[in-house]
Image (cartoon, rainbow, N blue to C red):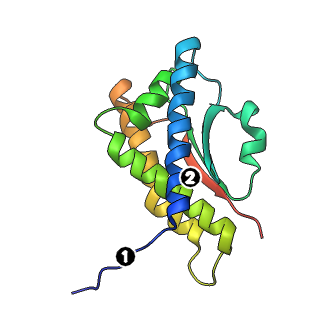
Amino acid sequence: MSKKTTFRFPAADVLAAKAAMTAFHDHLVAKAAVNKETIDDPHVVFGVGEIVAGPKSDLAAKLAADPSAYLLIDPPGGITYAELHDIFFGAPRQKEAEELMGFTLVMLQMIRRVGEPKGRSLMAFTEEKFLFPLLLMAMEYSNEKVPQQIVSRVEYSTRRYK
């Protein structure tokens, strides 16, 4: 039987992640209220202590931050801020999505604080355990919205330079 591993994150990092998710929720609600059009080249960018969504052109500085990660979610027919809100905060995905977003933010903070250790990359771990499941949620949502064989342009990436 394998031994369970328990990770303990600094309380300040967890509180910062919760605050970032609340701000992201509020950002999506505010944008959805005024902008009903589809987003051109929509990205969701995770940075240290923040999550933002919008067109890639508006998020260039956020995408260049170190460390950062992003999701590109662009199903056929496009996506609106209301639909992004539904992916991350709508039932039945909300609890799992919030956990995955929170862990992503905490890991980015840890990477900034301690850097990348030798051996397995923390960024690779973050991609595998937290971003990939968020990607699958977005693909599932997109398929529910518009049944299709292939979801076009859904990807994730992380950025970490030494």
Residue 160 sits in which quadrant?
bottom right
**Gap between marks 1 and 2 measured at Cα:** 20 Å
In the picture, measured across the screen, residue 2 lies left or right of residue 72, that is: left
**Contact (Cβ within 8 Å) of mark 1 with mark 2:** no
Q: Quadrant of the C terminus?
A: bottom right
Q: Which residue lies furthest to the left in this view?
A: 1
Q: Determine the residue positioned at 56% across, 52% down.
A: 16
Residue 147 visible within the image: yes
Q: Determine the residue positioned at 46% across, 29% down.
A: 85
Q: Nearer the viewer, residue 151 or 33?
A: 33
Would you place residue 53 above or below residue 7 in this image? above
In the picture, measured across the screen, residue 133 lies left or right of residue 78, that is: left
Q: What residue type is labelled 1?
A: Thr
Q: Residues within 10 Å of mark 1 (few under 14, many from 20)?
A: few
x, y (%) of residue 63? 72, 46
x, y (%) of residue 105? 55, 55
Would you place residue 104 above or below residue 138 in this image? below
Q: Name the residue under label 1.
A: 6
Q: Which of the labelled discs sits on residue 16, or is there none?
A: 2
Going from the N terminus, do you reach mark 1 or mark 2 first?
1
Q: Determine the residue positioned at 33% across, 40% down.
A: 93
Residue 78 visible within the image: no
Q: Determine the residue positioned at 56% across, 36% down.
A: 23
Would you place residue 33 above or below residue 140 in this image? above
Badge count: 2
Tell me the SS state at disc 1.
Answer: loop
Q: Which amino acid does label 2 sit on?
A: Ala
In the picture, measured across the screen, residue 66 lies left or right of residue 91, that is: right
x, y (%) of residue 132? 46, 54
Tell me the SS state at disc 2.
Answer: helix
For discs 1 and 2, the disc positioned in front in the rendered view: 2
Q: In which quarter of the image is the N terminus?
A: bottom left
